[in-house]
Image (cartoon, coloured by chain):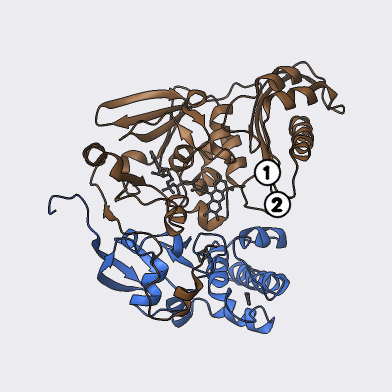
Amino acid sequence: MTDLVGHEDVDIEATLNGKPLKRRVKARQHLADFLRQELELTGTHLGCEHGICGACTVLIDGRSVRSCLTLAAQISGKSVDTIEGLSQSGRLADLQKAFIERNAAQCGFCSSGMLLTAYELVSTGEAASRAEIREYLSGNMCRCTGYHAIIDAVEAVIAARTAGARQS
Amino acid sequence: MLFDSTLSLKHNVQIMKARNFRYIRPDSLQHAYRILEENGGDAVPIAGGQSLLAGLNMRLSAPKLLVDIGGLKELAGQSQRDGTIRLGALTRHGELLQSDLVRKQLPLLAQAAAHIGHVAIRNRGTLGGSLAYADPAAELPACSVALRATLVLGSAAGEREVKAEDFFKGLFETDLRPGELIVAVKFPAPQANTTAGFAELARRRGDFALVGLAAMVSARRDRIEGARLVYFGCVDRAKVAASVSVAVSGLAMPVLDTAAFEREIRQDLTPDDTPGLRAETKLHMATVLTRRVLNSLVMQAAS
Ligand SMILES: Cc1cc2nc3c(=O)[nH]c(=O)nc-3n(C[C@H](O)[C@H](O)[C@H](O)COP(=O)(O)OP(=O)(O)OC[C@H]3O[C@@H](n4cnc5c(N)ncnc54)[C@H](O)[C@@H]3O)c2cc1C
Ligand code: FES
Ligand code: FES
């Protein structure tokens, strides 16, 4: 059976949270399971595993993606950021502080995905209305907060960041 | 239904719901063609994976070999030449929203892309993937028919071109032959006097449409001269709604009375009764949506 095309185990080389990553992964394993089970990075959560809930959101090359709808094999040559890396680097600090101040995280199940999607939005450096924030976060479900607190937190961070940018 | 809770509760059980498959990332388009040809029905291309991987996770299909075309440069990029806009199959939904070329020349696609899923889905899902998947409730197949697009299809045997209106054959069924890939989609630059109209109704933002309409309409002053209306949802495939398109031509705008095209909507649309929503309700929604789209063109003209 050696002449079969393709492999069930795939060698990948990627950047994960700023550090080089070299691994052999199962072709059928999605990125969320790879992060959680192989690397024990359990901050990326799994809700639905078919793209609906947003709990598994990570960044690939700076863009938000569903890690349940991405194969681990597909990150080769790319740069992946998870909640762990972005927290430790301090890049999420203002969003996290705003979430805590406004009680925008309750059980916390949605929070990592919510923060990463919000991070992609605030990183554009552009102002956004409440309606635009709502639309941007519409693919991330939260069963606790009723969303208003989350919108408040993201709005505050965007206001602070755009004000900071104007001053400097 | 989607979760095996006994599996997910046991901590150290591997939860990989997709069946085993092999994976390969071809180096070039020709390489991809060769793999697809040699492996026949065992091989399935994967582009953005936003429909395919959801299906694999739910074990709705079990391909033996995934051919990852997501990195092929030959399938990427956007260009314009001699009044034709060519979008590579790997054009992401998010790029349709952001590309200046698309927003200026093909605003219908930019309007439609805003309704596809959510930002993370749009960051990965591709034009080629959406057309190949041919969901009857998807936006882009309908837009490509409304815009008179031509699909460039390639395989080891060479390339051929198929008009979008001949490409969609039925429910999730297309003219793609075994081993064939969508390479690019070509759009004629719309005529100066035609305007794009788009609207859809969905239960929630980002869901597939219950009913939607992609329209290219030409008008002189306040009278509709010609229309090419393509509905999604309530149809089995993307096709021109021939009767409604004829019925609205000649109407004065704003359109206040829908009687002029209600009967034709019943001819062109084939909604089913679904839980909580009768076919009759969907026909009513389609009628209201049609009036809204037509009248949005008046607003566009005025502004
Ligand atoms: C939560 C969620 C919400 C969504 N909402 C919407 C929505 O509102 N509207 C909508 O239209 N879509 C929606 N989608 C689907 C999304 O648009 C997909 O991106 C799209 O349907 C498929 O594109 P893809 O690149 O991801 O294709 P893939 O998933 O990679 O492939 C889909 C199919 O097309 C084939 N294929 C892919 N590329 C090619 C090619 N170039 N040539 C030949 N065959 C090819 C594959 O073999 C596969 O059979 C949603 C998806 C999710 C997960
Ligand atoms: S677990 Fe990925 S979107 Fe729900
Ligand atoms: S905080 Fe519990 S799901 Fe959002």
Q: Which residue is mark 2?
A: B203
Quadrant of res B42: top left
Q: State if disc 2 and disc 1 touch (CB < 8 Å).
A: yes
Residue drawn at the location 23% of the way across and 46% of the way down: B27
Above or below residue A168? Residue B52 is above
The residue type indicated by label 1 comes to: Leu
Q: Residue A119 location, x and y as percent?
A: 54, 68
- SS at circle 1: loop
Q: Chain of mark 2?
A: B
Foreground residue among B148 and A26: A26
- Tell if the residue under mark 1 belongs to the same chain as the one under mark 2: yes
What shade does chain B have? brown
Q: Residue B85 location, x and y as percent?
A: 47, 30
User: Does residue B144 show up?
Assistant: yes
User: Does residue B103 show up?
Assistant: no
Q: Chain of mark 1?
A: B
What shade does chain A have? blue
Q: Quadrant of the N terminus of chain B?
A: bottom right
Quadrant of res B303: top right
Q: Which residue is mark 1?
A: B210
Foreground residue among A144 and B10: B10
Foreground residue among B205 and B38: B38
- SS at circle 2: loop
Residue drawn at the location 57% of the way across and 63% of the way down: A121
